[in-house]
Image: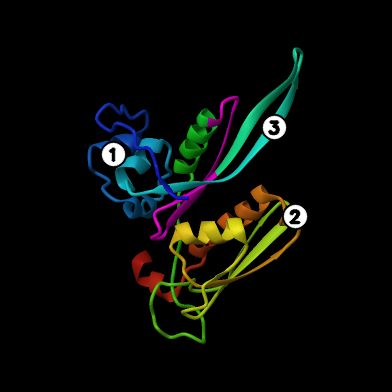
Amino acid sequence: MAEEVPVSNVEEWKPRTKVGQLVKEGKISSISELYARNLSIVEPEIVDVLLPNMKYEVIDIGMVQKQTDAGELSRYKVLVVMGNYDGYVSIGVGKSKQLRVAIQKAIRDAKMHVIPVRRGCGSWECTCGESHSLPFLVSGKAGSTEVVLRPAPKGTGLVAGGVLKSLLTYAGIKDVWSFSRGETRTTDNFIFAGYKALYNTYRFVTPLDWARRR
Protein backbone atom coordinates (compact mmCIF):
# COMPACT_ATOMS: atom_id res chain seq x y z
CA MET A 1 0.00 0.00 0.00
CA ALA A 2 1.37 3.40 -0.99
CA GLU A 3 2.28 5.84 1.77
CA GLU A 4 3.34 9.47 1.73
CA VAL A 5 7.09 10.00 1.81
CA PRO A 6 8.12 11.78 5.02
CA VAL A 7 9.35 15.28 4.17
CA SER A 8 12.20 16.97 6.00
CA ASN A 9 11.87 20.43 7.52
CA VAL A 10 13.13 22.59 4.66
CA GLU A 11 13.45 25.70 6.82
CA GLU A 12 15.92 23.95 9.13
CA TRP A 13 17.78 22.35 6.22
CA LYS A 14 21.38 23.56 5.91
CA PRO A 15 22.67 22.50 2.46
CA ARG A 16 26.14 20.96 2.47
CA THR A 17 26.61 21.09 -1.30
CA LYS A 18 26.41 23.67 -4.06
CA VAL A 19 23.44 21.89 -5.68
CA GLY A 20 21.53 21.87 -2.40
CA GLN A 21 22.23 25.56 -1.93
CA LEU A 22 20.91 26.39 -5.41
CA VAL A 23 17.72 24.42 -4.71
CA LYS A 24 17.08 26.08 -1.35
CA GLU A 25 17.69 29.54 -2.81
CA GLY A 26 15.16 28.83 -5.57
CA LYS A 27 17.68 29.08 -8.41
CA ILE A 28 16.69 25.52 -9.38
CA SER A 29 12.93 25.29 -9.15
CA SER A 30 12.13 21.97 -10.87
CA ILE A 31 13.54 18.48 -11.01
CA SER A 32 13.66 18.60 -14.82
CA GLU A 33 15.94 21.64 -14.62
CA LEU A 34 18.22 19.70 -12.30
CA TYR A 35 18.61 16.89 -14.84
CA ALA A 36 18.91 19.36 -17.74
CA ARG A 37 22.00 20.79 -16.04
CA ASN A 38 23.36 17.26 -15.56
CA LEU A 39 23.44 17.69 -11.78
CA SER A 40 23.21 14.83 -9.30
CA ILE A 41 20.89 14.52 -6.31
CA VAL A 42 23.39 14.60 -3.48
CA GLU A 43 21.04 15.42 -0.60
CA PRO A 44 17.63 13.85 0.11
CA GLU A 45 16.15 17.25 0.97
CA ILE A 46 16.47 18.20 -2.71
CA VAL A 47 13.72 15.70 -3.53
CA ASP A 48 11.59 17.00 -0.66
CA VAL A 49 11.68 20.46 -2.24
CA LEU A 50 11.37 19.59 -5.94
CA LEU A 51 9.12 16.51 -5.70
CA PRO A 52 6.96 16.93 -2.59
CA ASN A 53 4.24 14.52 -3.79
CA MET A 54 6.31 11.33 -3.80
CA LYS A 55 4.90 8.11 -2.39
CA TYR A 56 6.63 4.90 -1.38
CA GLU A 57 5.87 1.24 -0.76
CA VAL A 58 7.88 -1.42 1.08
CA ILE A 59 8.54 -4.20 -1.43
CA ASP A 60 10.63 -6.67 0.54
CA ILE A 61 11.80 -7.19 4.13
CA GLY A 62 14.54 -9.68 4.89
CA MET A 63 17.17 -10.51 7.47
CA VAL A 64 20.91 -10.27 6.89
CA GLN A 65 23.64 -11.56 9.19
CA LYS A 66 27.19 -10.41 9.75
CA GLN A 67 29.84 -12.45 11.53
CA THR A 68 31.68 -10.46 14.20
CA ASP A 69 34.05 -11.28 17.07
CA ALA A 70 31.07 -11.22 19.44
CA GLY A 71 29.05 -13.57 17.23
CA GLU A 72 26.43 -13.11 14.53
CA LEU A 73 24.89 -9.68 14.10
CA SER A 74 21.38 -9.77 12.59
CA ARG A 75 19.82 -6.78 10.88
CA TYR A 76 16.72 -6.01 8.85
CA LYS A 77 17.11 -5.30 5.16
CA VAL A 78 14.30 -3.28 3.57
CA LEU A 79 13.68 -2.59 -0.11
CA VAL A 80 11.32 0.24 -1.07
CA VAL A 81 10.06 1.63 -4.36
CA MET A 82 9.21 5.32 -4.65
CA GLY A 83 7.59 7.47 -7.31
CA ASN A 84 5.12 10.21 -8.12
CA TYR A 85 3.07 8.27 -10.75
CA ASP A 86 4.16 10.89 -13.29
CA GLY A 87 7.55 10.06 -14.78
CA TYR A 88 9.82 9.86 -11.74
CA VAL A 89 10.70 6.67 -9.89
CA SER A 90 13.32 5.29 -7.53
CA ILE A 91 14.28 2.33 -5.40
CA GLY A 92 16.20 2.28 -2.12
CA VAL A 93 17.72 -0.20 0.31
CA GLY A 94 18.22 0.24 4.05
CA LYS A 95 19.66 -1.95 6.81
CA SER A 96 19.34 -1.62 10.56
CA LYS A 97 18.74 -3.56 13.75
CA GLN A 98 15.33 -1.89 14.01
CA LEU A 99 12.76 -2.23 11.25
CA ARG A 100 11.57 1.37 11.51
CA VAL A 101 15.11 2.70 11.14
CA ALA A 102 15.76 0.38 8.20
CA ILE A 103 12.68 1.77 6.42
CA GLN A 104 13.84 5.33 7.06
CA LYS A 105 17.28 4.53 5.63
CA ALA A 106 15.68 2.91 2.57
CA ILE A 107 13.52 6.01 1.96
CA ARG A 108 16.57 8.24 2.29
CA ASP A 109 18.50 6.04 -0.13
CA ALA A 110 15.61 6.10 -2.61
CA LYS A 111 15.52 9.91 -2.58
CA MET A 112 19.16 9.92 -3.69
CA HIS A 113 18.44 7.70 -6.70
CA VAL A 114 15.36 9.28 -8.30
CA ILE A 115 15.46 8.99 -12.10
CA PRO A 116 13.26 10.43 -14.86
CA VAL A 117 11.38 7.97 -17.05
CA ARG A 118 10.65 8.78 -20.67
CA ARG A 119 7.08 7.80 -21.53
CA GLY A 120 5.31 7.67 -24.85
CA CYS A 121 3.29 5.59 -27.27
CA GLY A 122 5.80 3.43 -29.11
CA SER A 123 3.55 0.54 -30.11
CA TRP A 124 2.74 0.22 -33.83
CA GLU A 125 -0.70 -1.07 -32.76
CA CYS A 126 -1.55 2.22 -31.08
CA THR A 127 -1.29 5.71 -32.51
CA CYS A 128 -2.96 7.71 -29.76
CA GLY A 129 0.15 9.80 -29.09
CA GLU A 130 -0.41 9.79 -25.31
CA SER A 131 2.24 9.02 -22.72
CA HIS A 132 0.73 5.78 -21.45
CA SER A 133 3.58 3.40 -22.33
CA LEU A 134 7.23 3.51 -23.43
CA PRO A 135 8.46 5.16 -26.65
CA PHE A 136 10.69 2.20 -27.58
CA LEU A 137 12.05 -1.12 -26.32
CA VAL A 138 14.47 -0.95 -23.39
CA SER A 139 16.30 -3.53 -21.31
CA GLY A 140 18.23 -3.72 -18.06
CA LYS A 141 20.34 -6.32 -16.30
CA ALA A 142 21.30 -6.94 -12.68
CA GLY A 143 23.24 -10.05 -11.76
CA SER A 144 21.84 -12.96 -13.76
CA THR A 145 18.44 -11.28 -14.21
CA GLU A 146 17.57 -9.41 -17.38
CA VAL A 147 14.34 -7.48 -17.95
CA VAL A 148 13.08 -6.29 -21.33
CA LEU A 149 10.24 -3.75 -21.49
CA ARG A 150 8.33 -3.34 -24.73
CA PRO A 151 5.70 -0.69 -25.61
CA ALA A 152 2.12 -1.95 -25.58
CA PRO A 153 -1.09 -0.52 -27.05
CA LYS A 154 -3.56 1.32 -24.87
CA GLY A 155 -5.69 -0.96 -22.71
CA THR A 156 -3.12 -3.75 -22.43
CA GLY A 157 -2.22 -2.99 -18.84
CA LEU A 158 1.02 -3.94 -17.09
CA VAL A 159 1.99 -7.42 -18.20
CA ALA A 160 4.71 -7.86 -15.58
CA GLY A 161 5.57 -9.65 -12.34
CA GLY A 162 4.62 -8.42 -8.88
CA VAL A 163 7.54 -6.19 -7.85
CA LEU A 164 8.19 -5.06 -11.42
CA LYS A 165 4.53 -4.11 -11.79
CA SER A 166 4.79 -1.92 -8.68
CA LEU A 167 7.88 -0.19 -10.09
CA LEU A 168 6.14 0.55 -13.40
CA THR A 169 3.03 1.81 -11.60
CA TYR A 170 5.00 4.32 -9.53
CA ALA A 171 6.75 5.48 -12.70
CA GLY A 172 3.39 6.36 -14.27
CA ILE A 173 3.42 3.67 -16.98
CA LYS A 174 0.02 2.12 -17.67
CA ASP A 175 0.63 -0.28 -20.57
CA VAL A 176 3.72 -2.40 -21.19
CA TRP A 177 4.86 -5.91 -22.10
CA SER A 178 7.74 -7.30 -20.05
CA PHE A 179 10.04 -10.23 -20.71
CA SER A 180 12.54 -11.56 -18.19
CA ARG A 181 15.20 -14.22 -18.03
CA GLY A 182 17.53 -15.43 -15.30
CA GLU A 183 16.87 -15.90 -11.59
CA THR A 184 13.81 -13.66 -11.26
CA ARG A 185 13.01 -15.09 -7.82
CA THR A 186 15.80 -12.87 -6.46
CA THR A 187 13.71 -9.81 -5.68
CA ASP A 188 16.62 -7.36 -5.51
CA ASN A 189 18.07 -8.30 -8.90
CA PHE A 190 14.63 -8.46 -10.53
CA ILE A 191 13.57 -4.96 -9.51
CA PHE A 192 17.06 -3.49 -10.07
CA ALA A 193 17.00 -4.87 -13.63
CA GLY A 194 13.64 -3.16 -14.20
CA TYR A 195 15.02 0.05 -12.67
CA LYS A 196 17.97 0.02 -15.06
CA ALA A 197 15.62 -0.60 -17.98
CA LEU A 198 13.63 2.53 -17.05
CA TYR A 199 16.89 4.42 -16.61
CA ASN A 200 17.82 3.52 -20.19
CA THR A 201 14.76 5.31 -21.57
CA TYR A 202 16.81 8.52 -21.49
CA ARG A 203 20.04 7.02 -22.83
CA PHE A 204 18.62 7.02 -26.35
CA VAL A 205 18.36 10.33 -28.23
CA THR A 206 15.16 10.59 -30.26
CA PRO A 207 14.44 13.07 -33.10
CA LEU A 208 12.36 15.08 -30.63
CA ASP A 209 15.53 15.75 -28.62
CA TRP A 210 17.55 17.10 -31.52
CA ALA A 211 16.16 20.63 -31.22
CA ARG A 212 16.74 20.62 -27.45
CA ARG A 213 20.43 19.81 -27.85
CA ARG A 214 21.25 22.69 -30.20
Name the element at disc 3.
Answer: strand
Relative horizontal placement of residue 168, taking residue 212 as reference (left or right): right
Name the element at disc 1.
Answer: helix
Q: Is residue 153 above or below residue 101?
A: below
User: Given this view, does label 3 or label 1 mark the residue nearer the observer?
Assistant: 3
Q: CA distance from mark 3 to mark 2?
A: 21 Å
Residue 95 in sight here: yes
Name the element at disc 2.
Answer: loop
Relative horizontal placement of residue 46, taking residue 91 as reference (left or right): left
Q: Residues within 10 Å of mark 3 (few under 14, many from 20)?
A: few
Instruction: From the image, give the main secondary structure of the stretch colored magenta.
Output: strand
Q: Tell which circle, 3 or 2, labels the residue nearer the N-terminal end.
A: 3
Q: Residue at x 43, y 86 (%)?
A: 127
User: Given this view, does label 3 or label 2 mark the residue nearer the observer?
Assistant: 3
- Tag of residue 106: none
Place of residue 191 in the rendered image (x, y in percent of width and height, measured from the top left):
61, 53
User: Given this view, does label 2 or label 1 mark the residue nearer the observer?
Assistant: 2
Q: Residues within 10 Å of mark 2 (few under 14, many from 20)?
A: few
Relative horizontal placement of residue 171, taking residue 7 as reference (left or right): right
Q: Residues within 10 Å of mark 1 (few under 14, many from 20)?
A: some
Magenta range is: 80-99
- Whether label 3 touches label 2, CB < 8 Å: no
Place of residue 102 in the rendered image (x, y in percent of width and height, measured from the top left):
54, 32
Tag 2 residue: 144
Tag 1 residue: 22
Relative horizontal placement of residue 87, taking residue 60 as reference (left or right): left
Q: Tell which circle, 3 or 1, labels the residue nearer the N-terminal end.
A: 1
Q: Amino acid at mark 1?
A: Leu
- Tag of residue 64: 3
